[in-house]
Image: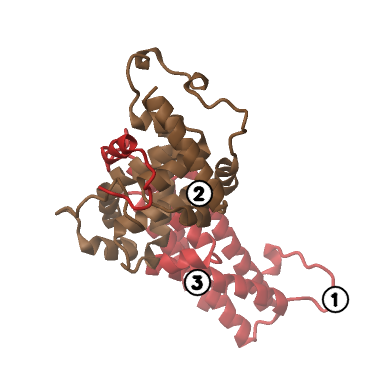
Chain colours: A red, B brown
């Protein structure tokens, strides 16, 4: 075979190159390592929604989960703004400052609890690094819920704040469902 | 990509067109089939570019993980093997880019000895020629990269320069150096 781009290539060397095999199989199967990285990448994509390039090629469910976290982040920021004190004093939230569950939020909490139990049962079989990523994301969501509920406790009549609280809960449930999907991938 | 001395394999009966579409939608089993089909060629390229089995395995893994991430951008304008091939080269050159570029830039000093005396040879190979694969692996990094991309896989100087950020003239010097060293090793 001639190669017009290498006219000065020594004919003997050219012949040797032409004899090189086009395929050389790896000495070990690399797919297991690659598969693990793909799964880990999916998890990271859920936790890092700002990486738009990754989100674009994600399956629909993961893209939705990533979008959910964007909403959660926005919600947390908004509720933080809405719950800001009149002075510049930093408000430290604690459980006593949070209003007790209103009836409408109980069903959200129950669903979230069931999904959390399901995920924790699967988490034992997951790679610890994966669990750490998911749990870190969960802490972010829970923090957003705490802040949103604190704002609601201060202004329980506000339909806008209540709507945000419910939205954050819905995103938590959605995230937990996706986290369970990720965990199931590792069971296959 | 220009004609290469080591050609692509013909399409095989196991090449399922749907696998690309399925993998683009997140089907890892379809992607696993694509991996099995193409890993031999990608590994051959990786072995020649890196000169080391362990580094080649890392490059193969990196390339397939990147392929998974970028598969959504594959529109079929080129054949999948060609797309994978170029992607692997880009991963190799861009990952840890400074090292690759430095290797390509490092030109031999005029006074530096470039003879077989400078290259240790195992006793078992002293009585006969060493094969081309092993000779390629023994080339200095920059010379090896230029030789593999240009003389084996048909990239021209400008393409290699564009991908690596190194001047075409430097690529030419590295190529000349590689050919001379290979001639010394193969036909002492």
The answer to whether residue B70 shows anywhere in this view is yes
- The residue tagged with tag 3: helix, strand or loop? helix
Residue A162 coordinates in the image, percent (x, y)? 59, 81
Res. B26 image quadrant = bottom left
Residue appearing at x 47%, y 44% in the figure: B146
Residue appearing at x 51%, y 78% in the figure: A104
Residue under circle 1?
A: A87
* Mark 3 surroundings within 10 Å by alpha-carbon count, few (fewer than 14), some (14 through 19), many (20 or more): some
Residue under circle 2?
A: B93
Residue B142 coordinates in the image, percent (x, y)? 52, 40
Of residue B80 and residue A110, the one placed in the foreground of this image is B80
From the image, state whether disc 2 or disc 1 is nearer to you.
Answer: 2
The answer to whether residue A134 shows anywhere in this view is no
Mark pair 1, 3: CA separation = 33 Å
Residue B62 coordinates in the image, percent (x, y)? 44, 48
Q: Chain of mark 1?
A: A
Asked if the residues shown at circle 1 and circle 3 are in contact, with their CB atoms under 8 angstroms apart, the answer is no
Asked if the residues shown at circle 3 and circle 2 are in contact, with their CB atoms under 8 angstroms apart, the answer is no
From the image, state whether disc 3 or disc 2 is nearer to you.
Answer: 2
Mark pair 2, 1: CA separation = 55 Å
Q: Chain of mark 2?
A: B
In the image, taking residue A151 as reference, residue A175 lies left or right, namely left
Residue under circle 3?
A: A67
Q: Identify the image quadrant of the N terminus of chain B.
A: bottom left
Of residue A26 and residue B187, the one placed in the foreground of this image is B187
Mark pair 3, 2: CA separation = 33 Å
- The residue tagged with tag 1: helix, strand or loop? loop
From the image, state whether disc 1 or disc 3 is nearer to you.
Answer: 3
């Amino acid at each position: 075979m001639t190669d017009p781009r290498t006219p000065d290539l020594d004919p003997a060397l050219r012949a040797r190159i032409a004899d090189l095999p086009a395929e050389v199989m790896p000495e070990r199967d690399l797919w297991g390592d690659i598969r693990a990285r793909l799964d880990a990448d999916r998890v990271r994509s859920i936790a890092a929604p700002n990486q738009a390039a990754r989100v674009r090629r994600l399956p629909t469910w993961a893209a939705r989960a990533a979008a959910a976290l964007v909403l959660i982040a926005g919600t947390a920021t908004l509720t933080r703004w809405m719950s800001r004190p009149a002075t510049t004093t930093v408000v430290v939230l604690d459980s006593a400052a949070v209003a007790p569950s209103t009836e409408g939020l109980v069903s959200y909490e129950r669903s979230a609890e069931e999904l959390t139990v399901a995920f924790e049962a699967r988490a034992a079989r997951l790679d610890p690094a994966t669990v750490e990523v998911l749990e870190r994301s969960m802490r972010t969501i829970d923090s957003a819920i705490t802040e949103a509920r604190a704002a609601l406790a201060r202004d329980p009549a506000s339909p806008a704040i209540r709507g945000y609280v419910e939205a954050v809960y819905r995103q938590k449930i959605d995230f937990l469902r996706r986290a369970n999907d990720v965990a199931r991938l590792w069971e296959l | 990509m220009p004609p290469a001395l080591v050609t692509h394999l013909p399409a095989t009966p196991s090449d399922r067109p749907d696998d690309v579409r399925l993998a683009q939608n997140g089907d890892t089993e379809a992607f696993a089939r694509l991996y099995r089909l193409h890993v031999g060629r990608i590994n051959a390229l990786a072995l020649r570019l890196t000169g080391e089995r362990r580094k080649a395995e890392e490059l193969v893994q990196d390339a397939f993980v990147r392929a998974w991430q970028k598969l959504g951008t594959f529109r079929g304008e080129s054949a999948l093997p060609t797309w994978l091939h170029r992607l692997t080269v880009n991963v190799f050159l861009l990952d840890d880019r400074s090292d690759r570029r430095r290797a390509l830039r490092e030109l031999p000093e005029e006074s530096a000895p470039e003879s077989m005396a400078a290259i240790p040879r195992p006793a078992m190979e002293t009585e006969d020629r060493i094969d081309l694969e092993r000779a390629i692996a023994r080339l200095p990094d920059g010379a090896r990269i230029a030789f593999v991309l240009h003389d084996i896989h048909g990239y021209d100087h400008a393409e290699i320069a564009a991908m690596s950020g190194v001047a075409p003239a430097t690529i030419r010097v590295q190529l000349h150096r590689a050919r001379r060293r290979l001639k010394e090793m193969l036909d002492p």
